[in-house]
Amino acid sequence: MPKQSMPKESLNISPASVNDYRRLAEKRLPRQFFDYIDGASYQETTAHENLRAFDKLKLKQRILKDVSDVQTGCNLLGKDLDMPLVLAPVGLAGCYARRGEVQVLKAANNANVPFCLSTVGICSIEELAAQASAPFWFQLYVIKDRSFAIDLMQRAAKAGCDTLVFTVDLPVLGERYRDIRNGLSGGYNWLGGLKRGWDIVSHTSWLWDVAIRGKPLVFGSLSEAVPDANSLGDFKGWVDSQFDPSMTWKDLDWIRENWSGKIVIKGILDKEDAKQAVGVGADAIVVSNHGGRQLDGVPATLDVLPEIVEAVNKKCEIIVDGGIRSGLDLVKAIALGADACMIGRAWAYALAARGEQGVTHVIDIIKNEMKVAMALTGVTRVEDIDQKILGEG
Ligand code: FNR
């Protein structure tokens, strides 16, 4: 899903943008894992819309406004951050780089931005806690086995997580054609198995670094729930069967009873749902279409953000994700009323390409782009970014 690609005539010595990291990730990863990150559901229309919405929105250049001291710092959910950025929960990160979630956590801690561990991370809550120098967030899919969900929340609290991200846009799974074609989901056939095996062994540096030295490749936090699992496929089978389509707003009371920290509801695209989230006491919501990975055909998150901002009326904080590939995108989202942005694929590409160093670089790239966008639109503080910095379409 390139927004812009590296020009062929460049020397390509050093990655300069998130999209350069996308290209590097494509080279390093077995196809099935690159496609798992890069792909989206059905025709991938919504995933493309997420990118297009940022391209369509224009910034307004202003001049001679003393921009000698631009600051990207902000406060989110009571914490001072170096910039309004959160690293989104992304499953299977330990398959992109050796003990991937730990590497991302370290990059996030050093940059003073939050990292959110996915329910389906390769590294467990406890493995992350042992390496964390600041609290991380934990993302929960509510699974049918409620006692195990309570156990996960208790483990997260014990590990020092202060924020629970409750993902609500996955009562059923959207189909991703690339995963079916690559044999990552759907039925097994021997020819497919052979091709997948070749895909793995032909990526030798990844094979040695991740598949061999990065073991165990299991869903770390779930290993007690699926004790008989021998492969990632076994775990995936269990998780897929555990998504709970009977969940309703009432279940938020149950979450509140079992979690005393901040609660963030992720996967809101509708203003009435946003109001309901405020009603049940969410501390923040994430305006998200799961990066276009669930219901293809829903609008870009940037397009629904303004009406949700209006409906929420500052009663909780608003994070937005989907299609953010640069600091310029981030500034546009803040201008439309978001308090912060989440990035998913941007950090996943960087992790796959260059591990912790890559994620640190991508955060740095986004921060520098953000500073330049602020300076050239004439603002020096995050709280001053608003609709005034946006230009005519
Ligand atoms: C995701 N996302 C996701 N969300 C979640 O709540 N739990 C999860 O385990 C995952 N897993 C996951 C895997 C991969 C490979 C991707 C790309 C995404 C969704 C993620 O948190 C976020 O909403 C999107 O990634 C945002 O869109 P961008 O930034 O990727 O365009």
Image (tube, rainbow, N blue to C red):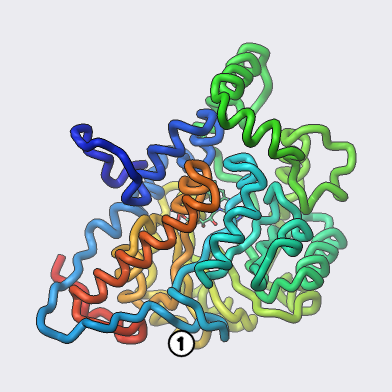
Q: Residue furthest left?
A: 64
Q: Is residue 144 above or below residue 314?
A: above
Relative to 137, 45 lies left or right:
left
Q: Is residue 316 above or below residue 39?
A: below
Q: Residue furthest top?
A: 191
Crowd around label 1: few <14 · some 14–19 · many ≥20 (10 Å): few
The C terminus, quarter of image? bottom left
* Front residue of 125 and 258: 125
Residue linked to disc 1: 314
Q: Is residue 280 above or below residue 94?
A: below
Q: Position of residue 221 (x, y in %)?
A: 78, 53
Which residue is pictured at 65% across the width and 68% down the height? 136
* Front residue of 284 and 350: 350
Which residue is pictured at 49% across the width and 83% down the height? 75
* Front residue of 287 and 17: 17
Q: Position of residue 36 (x, y in %)?
A: 53, 38
Name which quarter of the figure residue 32 lies in.
top right
Name which quarter of the figure residue 68 lies in.
bottom left
Q: Is residue 326 above or below residue 263?
A: above
Q: Secondary structure at mark 1?
A: loop
* Front residue of 105 and 275: 105
Relative to 88, 47 lies left or right:
left
Which residue is pictured at 69% across the width and 39% down the height? 214
Amino acid, disc 1: Lys
Relative to 243, 354 lies left or right:
left
Q: Position of residue 378 (x, y in %)?
A: 19, 80
The N terminus, quarter of image? top left
Q: Is residue 266 visible?
A: yes
